[in-house]
Each structure stands twice: as C-alpha cells, then as structure tokens.
Image: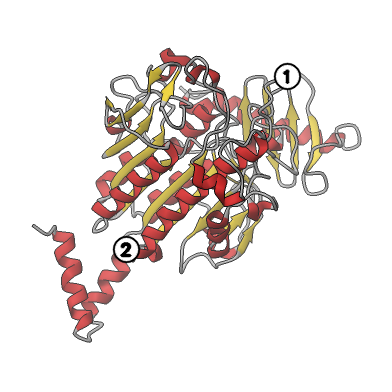
Amino acid sequence: MRSDTGRTLFFAWTLLLLGGDSAFTKDLKSSQKPNFLIMTADNLGYGDVGCYGNPKVKTPNIDKLASDGVRLTDFYTASPTCTVSRACLLTGRYPQRHGLTAQLPGIEGNYGEGLSQSEVILPKLLNPLGYRTGCFGKWNIGFAPGSRPTERGFDEFFGHASGNIDYFTHVYNQKLDMHRGIEPVQVEGYSTDLFADEAIAFIKKNRDYPFFVYLPFNAPHFPNPRNKQPGDPCIWQAPDRDFETYGWSAEETDEKRRYYTVITAMDRAIGRVLQNLDQMGLAQNTVVIFFSDNGAFMLENRGLEVASNQPFRNGGVTLYEGGIRVPCIVRWPGKIKAGTLCDAPLISLDWFPMLVAHAGGKVPQGLTLDGADPSDALFTGADSPHESLFFEYGNYQAMRKGNFKILRTESGGPFSLYDLDRDPGETTDLAQSQPELLRRTVGEFDVIQLEMNAEP
C-alpha cells in the first residue's frame, strides 16, 4: 500500500503531468522539508583531497561536490580525536558540556556507555518532525544497552561500535564488530562500500519522507595491527579496482600509494551515493555535508604517517591547526551558489542547530548548544556566527578569535599567539611582540573555560 506521503506526491505529479502547476503543487513544493546527508571521513587530512590542493590523490567525486557547492577553508572539528568529535557533532555541544572528553579505549570502552545517555542527539529532534533517520558506519561513542544508535533516535543502524575495524574482516581487537541494529552480523565486503550500499538502500526506501542519513566512513583510518590475524600484514586496504585507477598493482608496497587508494575508494563510494540521489530526483532537496572528523594523525615511529595536513602544523590529538582544521564541503542547490568558497571560521557543532532550524524544529528549552546556525555564512558569505572558537583536549588548550589563535600544550603553561592569516602553519609566536592582544584573548578564554566548568 502506498504511504500517505507517497499518495500525495503521486497526486501532485499527476497534476503536473496533466499540465497544471496548480496552487496545490506549488504549496507542496514550498512546504517540502529538506533531506540531510552528513558524510564524515575518518582522520582525513586537509592536504589529502584534490580540491584542497593535493594534485596526486584522485578524489573526483569530492572535487565535484565542491564545484557544485561551497568549499570551507576555515572549518574546524570540535575535537582532534574520533570519539569526542562525533559526540560533538551529534550534540552540538563542546566536550566540556557533554562530558565525553577522551577517546573510548578498547573493547570495554567502546562497548560501555560512552556519551551520557542523558544527552540529546540530533535524530531525537528530527524524528518528531517526520524524518526517517539512519546511521551507517563508525559509531564510536558507546555501545552499551541504551547507548546504541537505534536506542538513541536512529531508525536504522549498520556499522561498527569501535573506533576502527579491519576493512575486510570487520574485526576490532579480535572481536567481530559489525552490527545491524543491536545485533552483530557477519557480512562480506569492503566496509566503505558496505556503508555506502546501506545508505543508498535506506534513501531508496524512504524517498517519500524527509530523511537524515549520517554516513560516517571508517576510511581512511590507519590499519591497526590488533585487528589483524597473526601473519596478516598491517597495511592500508582497498579493493583491487581502486589500485587499478592509479595503474598500480594491489600488491603495491608503497604506503603513501596504498593510503591514496583508500581515499579514492571512499571517494568512489561517495560518488555512488550522490549519483543515486540524482537518479532518484532527490539531489535538489538534499543538503549534503562532507567533512573529516579530525586531522590526519602524525604519530611517530609507526611508518604509517603518509597523510598530509598541509599547509598546517602537526595533526590529530593536538590542537595545532593540523589536528582540528579539516576539509569540509556543503552542497544545497538553490541555497548555496555552486563553486564558492567560505572563509568564515565555522565548527562541526554548527550542523546541529542548522539542521534543526531548516527541518522546522526548535531546540528544547534548557538545552545549551555551542553551535550556531551557519546558514548566512554559507548562503551569502556573511561573517561567522561565532566571536571565537574554543578548544580543549588533554593538556592542550586553544581558542581562535578572528584571525588570531592562542594555544598552549600544557594546562597552566604559557600561551602562544599566532596570526593564522599570515602564518597558517603556526611557525611564528607573537606572544612577546603583541602582549596586550595576548592578554585580552587569554582573558576571554578564561571566561569561556569558567562557564564550561560551571555546567552541572
């Protein structure tokens, strides 16, 4: 039986085919809620995408997404590590407010409560507005009873609980870690492709409804030796066809080449999802957001540090620009002018209020959000809705205000001061030459930090 929404759309299209663009169909079009598709990469560096300046990696679908929408040059993830950044995205709140401030460790951590079950996450606000909601990919914010996606507002979930899995066996620390709903499942296939397949199937099934698809790829996360069977090599994994795209053998031993291939495999999956939106006639009314959960890791002595956060300093788990400034693209036909750039400082917390607002909802009274709707900046090039962006992770603390950023690597230690316009690589500390600017900025940081610590 056709759904009510399906019958309404069928009737509207019948009128259009009969030659009428009636008042009824005009009202139907104007009242149609937008669909939302958020896709995240895992540890993808700012310098690892073609449209962000890398001439060697093949990312044609991500590059086309940028040419069809707006490419953000000063976009930040709210945390430089996977678990925390995902909790921030789904709550619209800084870590110090939602309480999940560190990476979940091991089986015990990933299968524990994780993000407090009292926290309101995005699908909880979209469900009552008529949205179908699905999550397909990396969860990584807790998988205890009550913490799993389908218990927190998502209608469907297919993916893994942990922070990383083997791309083909789907094992995390010797445990099968792929789930459908709350049950573990044994499936065959490359994880990136499986997540895209599930997202496409969900969209097809729910095309008559507004939908929110959260598609957090586990690519291009580095390979983890604890996810391998004894004797299996710890190497970047991708299907043979993606090596062939470069003219390389699947037996390629160069780690940077293998890393590029993992990115290209993700790009191909993204292209399939976007192509299906086009084929279903949904692209015009779908907001597509793509960004990386944090900067690429630059940890020493593993032989796997082949990613790039250029032109920025350092990488994941630090608050240098390489750890928190990430590639981000937004497409919304008719709202966002194609091929534009946005240099307003924005943050991953902003998607929560933006999606709720455009879905026709309201943030519950008493829920403090740190994100701010960035629509004006994306649509018209307006300034950032933020006076400053606050960061705190481990011993690191930082704040960006305008073009200036303060940063310290030890709590209680001295802050450095950088002019990101002139020195995006954070090579020249201005603390001594501009002491008054440093004093004022540190004072503002202290006020924000006190407010965060005062949260109940």
What residue did someone put label 1 on?
410
At label 1, the amino acid type is Glu
Q: Residue at x 71, y 47 (%)?
A: 402
Quick one: 72 or 226, which is closer to the camera? 226
Quick one: 109 or 160, which is closer to the camera? 160
**Other-residue count near label 2 (Cα within 10 Å), few / some / many at <14 / 14–19 / ≥20:** few
Mark 1 residue element = loop
Q: Residue at x 41, y 43 (%)?
A: 193
Residue 133 picture quarter: top left
- Quadrant holding the C terminus: top left
Rendered position, 383 above or below 81: below
Residue 366's x, y, as percent?
39, 35
Residue 403's x, y, as percent?
74, 47
Residue 282 picture quarter: bottom left
Left or right: 332 in relation to 396:
left
**Other-residue count near label 1 (Cα within 10 Å), few / some / many at <14 / 14–19 / ≥20:** few
Left or right: 80 in relation to 198:
right
Real-space CA distance between mark 1 and mark 2, rounded to the nearest whole angstrom: 52 Å
Sequence-earlier tag: 1 or 2 = 2
What residue did someone put label 2 on?
280
- Quadrant holding the N terminus: bottom left
Q: Residue at x 63, y 20 (%)?
A: 394
Residue 348's x, y, as percent?
53, 42
At label 2, the amino acid type is Met
Rendered position, 401 above or below 432: below
